[in-house]
Image: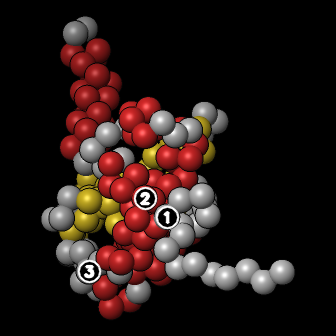
Amino acid sequence: MKREHLDFLADNPLYTRRFAFYVGRRCRSATVKEVAKELHLDWHAVKVLDKQYMTAQLARAGTPGSKAIGIDEISIRKGHTYRIVVSDLIRRRPIWFGGQDRSEASMAQFYDWLGPKKSAGIRLAVMDMWKPFRNATTDKAPQAAILFEKFHVIRHLTNALESVAPSTHD
């Protein structure tokens, strides 16, 4: 039996590429659950089609040349499993999601993916006070100014004030 490759089919042969694109586009303005209900599809099928859409969008966009980036970690599931998200602060969109954890090696994967030329174009990196992020940025993009998120700075200032405050009440 011979199988013919049909370019118009998505990764899942039950859906066309055009339909997969439509589902992914709908997921930009509605939740996966809402899109699944609207199109009478299983939630998992919509999630898979949305991921295919996002992968295609990233491939089409190419590697960005960002001047200002934001670095943060997100929790994947309970038990301290994290991934790193890097966003283009000027275009206001995520540009990279990856790493195995929130280590310096995982952060370096972003700069390796970006390449030395585009890493050299980064002028500002906004991040929390997590040392592995700072170390990887200093190593791979030394020209970039590092700006710490205000929430972390305020927390450190509050802790410092609280440690001083009890001694002033005596």
* x 25%, y 29%: residue: 158
User: In terms of secondary structure, where does tag 2 sit?
Assistant: helix
Give the residue furthest to the bottom. Answer: 117
The 10 Å Cα crowd at callout 1, few under 14, some 14 to 19, many 20 or more, is some
- Per the model, the C-alpha gap separating discs 1 and 3 is 32 Å
User: In terms of secondary structure, where does tag 3 sit?
Assistant: loop
Tags 3 and 2 in contact by the CB under 8 Å rule?
Answer: no
Q: Which mark is residue 146?
A: none
Image position of 30 (left or right of 99): left
**Residue occupied by mark 1:** 16
User: In terms of secondary structure, where does tag 1 sit?
Assistant: loop
In the rendered image, residue 20, in percent from the top left (x then y), is placed at 45, 59
Query: In the rendered structure, which amino acid carries the disc numbered 1?
Result: Thr
The mark closer to the camera, 3 or 2, is 2
Residue 66 sits above or below residue 44 on the image: below
Image position of 169 (left or right of 45): left
* x 48%, y 36%: residue: 40
In the rendered image, residue 76, in percent from the top left (x then y), is placed at 55, 43
- Per the model, the C-alpha gap separating discs 3 and 2 is 31 Å
**Residue occupied by mark 2:** 19
Please identify the quadrant where the N terminus is shown. Answer: bottom right
**Residue occupied by mark 3:** 65
Mark closer to the chain start, 1 or 3: 1
Mark closer to the chain start, 3 or 2: 2
The mark closer to the camera, 1 or 3, is 1
Query: In the rendered structure, which amino acid carries the disc numbered 2?
Result: Phe
